[in-house]
Image (cartoon, rainbow, N blue to C red):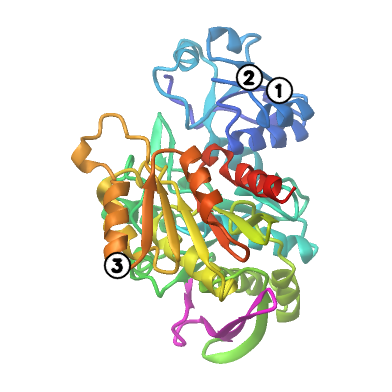
Amino acid sequence: MMELDPKLNLAPDNIRHIHIMGICGTGMAALAGMLKASGFAVTGSDSGVYPPMSDFLKEQRIEAASGYGPQNLQPRPDLVIVGNVITRKNPEAQALATTAIPYLSFPQALAHFFISARTSLVVAGTHGKTTTSSLLASALHRAGLDPSFMIGGIVREFDANFRLGNGRYFVVEGDEYDTAFFDKGSKFLHYRPNIAIITSVEFDHADIFADLDAIKRSFRKFVALLPQDGLIVAHLDDQNVAEVVADAPCEVQGYGFNPELAWSLADVRSGQGMTHFQIQHQGQKWAEMAVRMPGRHNCLNSLAVTAVLHRIGLAPEQINTALSSFGGVKRRQEVRGVERGITVIDDFAHHPTAVRETLGALKAAYAGQRLVTVFEPRTNSSRRAIFQQDYVSAFDAADLILIRKPLPLDNVPEAELFSSTQLASDLRERGLDARTFADTDTILDHLMTILQEGDVVAILSNGGFDNIHSRLLAKLGAVTK
């Protein structure tokens, strides 16, 4: 494909029609909506256009072609945005390569059209990005600062993963995954950060990073983007985070449980659906806060947001009001329903650390109740053997663990694949009740034989998991009728 000329004039006056390849991705559809709201004519294409994304695009009056091909570049657009899902062999990408139509990746387009004119607040890290960026955006909104945002999850307060505000701040979830087939650098390298939060640095995304050192190199590049008058709020309890911010060009404010850090937590306790904690700043008691989310990790996320809000001038009382009213993010410890006294929870956790923190938080929040965990290894990394041993200690808070056998990865030797059977065996040796299932139907059948009033079912997957949540609630509801 053509090399994009950095001097190319992409001013709004020169761009009227924008075509988006891979428009049905969550982020791409949100970008399409933002561009449409900004006055551009927007079209798109994807391998299949189905609800709910087809409904969303229809509401936005955006035409989307089902299937890729040269015909989708007619009438000729002024700019094409190429999604991460598009490969070099895609027929529409190959047709684009024969033209002189300029193109951008998703993060390039987001930065050019929406971030560049605002103060960029980027939340990066292996875990906690979505919750932390959602919490930050919601707090800014409640403080009357009218922020814009682009986040990888649906923020309950807005029932959306994006927003175009009139304020100076743009909150963006800084993903370390690669940008596009023509740009293998991390997405967050395009987001022009003025203030950044780094929540954690661990190995993940085995399909694009060779090892932890490769991930650290990418985070160091991100850190180097901060201006001298910028700020990094870094979780310095994490040694990997401490390493990547060591040579930061700007001020670094550490946060965590260590009281010697600039921002630290103390006296974390749960009660009546809230998690309460004390914030210390520079070793001194600063404020008492509370959030409607369980778990120490969510207190840490709130602490990081507090540091940013303090930097931009909010008072402790404003921050506490914003934190305590946060309604959460869909698919992050989201209660999908309660039937027969059985609570069904949906969570995105898949990395061993996220699984451990999520289950620990739920066990504390539902003290005295049986925690039944259903786990689907679905990501590229979780279906490889790289986390096989790490998962063994990740489920300790669960009373019963049901593991779905994953679909095998193409072109990966069997010896390098994750084994659900081995994990279940290792968990049983640890004294836990664990078993494997071939598919979602057999999991549902088993759940219906063992669930009892008071149980909490935590379903962990980064995908739709065959709509298991709604199907289980429907089955439980049918029994009561």
Tag shown at residue 78: 2
Image location (x, y in percent) of residue 56: 72, 32
Q: Quadrant of residue 79?
A: top right
> What range is drawn magenta here?
252-280
* Residue type for callout 3: Arg
Q: Residue at x 53, y 51 (%)?
A: 449
* Residue type for callout 1: Arg
Image location (x, y in percent) of residue 136: 65, 62
Residue at label 1? 16
In the rendered structure, does residue 258 fall within the stretch colored magenta? yes
| Closer-to-camera residue (368/127) | 368
| Closer-to-camera residue (148/2) | 148
Q: Is residue 292 left or right of residue 124?
A: right
Mark 1 Cα within 10 Å, few/some/many (few <14, many 20+)? some
Q: Residue at x 31, y 62 (%)?
A: 428
Q: Is residue 479 left or right of residue 431?
A: right
Image location (x, y in percent) of residue 436: 37, 48
Q: Quadrant of the N terminus?
A: top left
